[in-house]
Image (cartoon, helix red, strand yellow):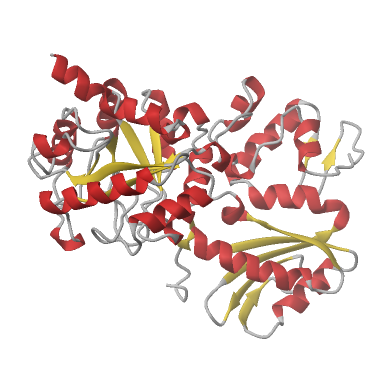
Amino acid sequence: LKESGAQILLPHGRAEAERLLSAVRRLPGVVRAEIAGAVRRHLETVRDVEIVAACVREPEAIAAAFARSPGVRDSVGSGTRHVAIRFDDGVRLQLHCVPASEFVVAWFRATGSAAHVQEVVARATLRGLTLGDHDLRDASGRTIELADEPALYAAIGLPWLPPELREGMGESEHAEREGFDGLVTLDDIRGVLHCHSQYSDGGATIAELAAAARARGWSYLGVSDHSQSAFYAGGLSAESLARQHDEIDAINASFSDFRVLKGVEADILPCGRIDYPTDVLDRFDYVIASVHSRLGMNERQMTDRVLKALDDPHISVLGHPTGRLLLTREPYAIDMDAVLEKAGRLGVAVELNADPHRLDLDWRLAKLARKYGATIEIGPDAHSVDGLENMALGIGMARKAWLRPEDVINTRSAEDFVSFATRRRREAAAR
């Protein structure tokens, strides 16, 4: 994959970027260097690492020197400030070496998508400014000194836009009209809900997951092992569930400031029915319903399958709604407009699965979910204690979708979430 210049997952791209950044910062004559491009914008997949370096002597010479580093297979652009480098291990680097006075504009240009840069350049023009490749100039042609990126945005009448928003999808207009203050952060998360223990295909015990979640400052953790139809993942029988719930009760008895919720990731069967009979589903605090089988259905079949499942009042969250696995499996055919509209109307949360291989719901569709009033659940899909770290990745995707804390269900307390999860069940029983 690396040899062919294919995309890699964001965590791998970020690791490569940080390694290369350290090497660039050690170059003589480099006074500052920062990551740019897709990694800085928090895109789910990355092709090239981009780094911008501010230099106190000839930028062309510094770029050329790095292109001759050990481990470099080949390079393009030697003798210029912008060098494309391919290393022996297949990693690809776009290195931009510029005078220190041009660093802010170069970093801005190397970070934003082409559409975002075009948006900002056009806004500068409307204000009588010229945002060129190297600097920002006023109407008389004088260079405007820029201390940092916020100064650049302020000069053209915009608040500073976090890098993850710079996709050219109307963010400049939205920033001018409403701003982006208050986007969701990791500190807003009160608990996590999509976690697998040793009862199914996870590698940690419930107690270990709970202790790790509590150490992160969260006040609850939901255990959502696979249901019985997921035999390939050790899906739980009704008898195993009874033992698991007894264990959860014992763990909860040991805490006064933390709660383990009884959940399940139940399969949506091909007919649209939820795995487990009603009396078993009634035992859970919440139910995540996901498609794991028959992924080759056509769009009408898959859409009907999921829409039928949403009618079940036990469903609290629709898990990884398009079934994609980044770089290895395309989303299954499904009408997400119809699904998101119904989820919003019925009060079913839609998952933004934060596993780096999934990141499903796609952040672009998460923006659409807001339009339909569908609440988002950010789930780590943790199969180990380390898997809880996925939440940071999910938060970045939620921010790309312009989500605020009120758009995310697990910014609520455990009590508020359980009330949300059981509301439809109570209403159905009352009818």
Name which residue lies at 51% across and 30% down: 405
Question: Does 45 sit left or right of 164 as displayed?
Answer: left
Residue 323 or 104: which is nearer the viewer?
323
Residue 71 or 199: which is nearer the viewer?
199
Name which residue lies at 13% across and 13% down: 431
Picture coordinates of residue 80 (x, y %)? Answer: 76, 68
- Whether residue 48 can be seen here: no
Name which residue lies at 14% across and 34% down: 304
Question: Does 190 sit left or right of 164 as displayed?
Answer: left
Name which residue lies at 43% across and 36% down: 410
Give above or below for 101 relative to 373: below
Give above or below for 412 relative to 86: above
Picture coordinates of residue 215 (x, y %)? Answer: 52, 51
Q: Quadrant of residue 130?
A: top right
Q: Quadrant of residue 143?
A: top right
Picture coordinates of residue 155 (x, y %)? Answer: 81, 32
Instruction: Assign the N terminus to one quadrant of the image.
Output: bottom left
- Whether residue 370 can be seen here: yes
Task: Check the image and name the residue furthest to the top.
Answer: 431
Residue 411 or 340: which is nearer the viewer?
411
Q: Give the mark count.
A: 0
Residue 26 or 288: which is nearer the viewer?
288
Give above or below for 387 relative to 304: below
Give above or below for 423 relative to 314: above
Picture coordinates of residue 126 (x, y %)? Answer: 74, 26
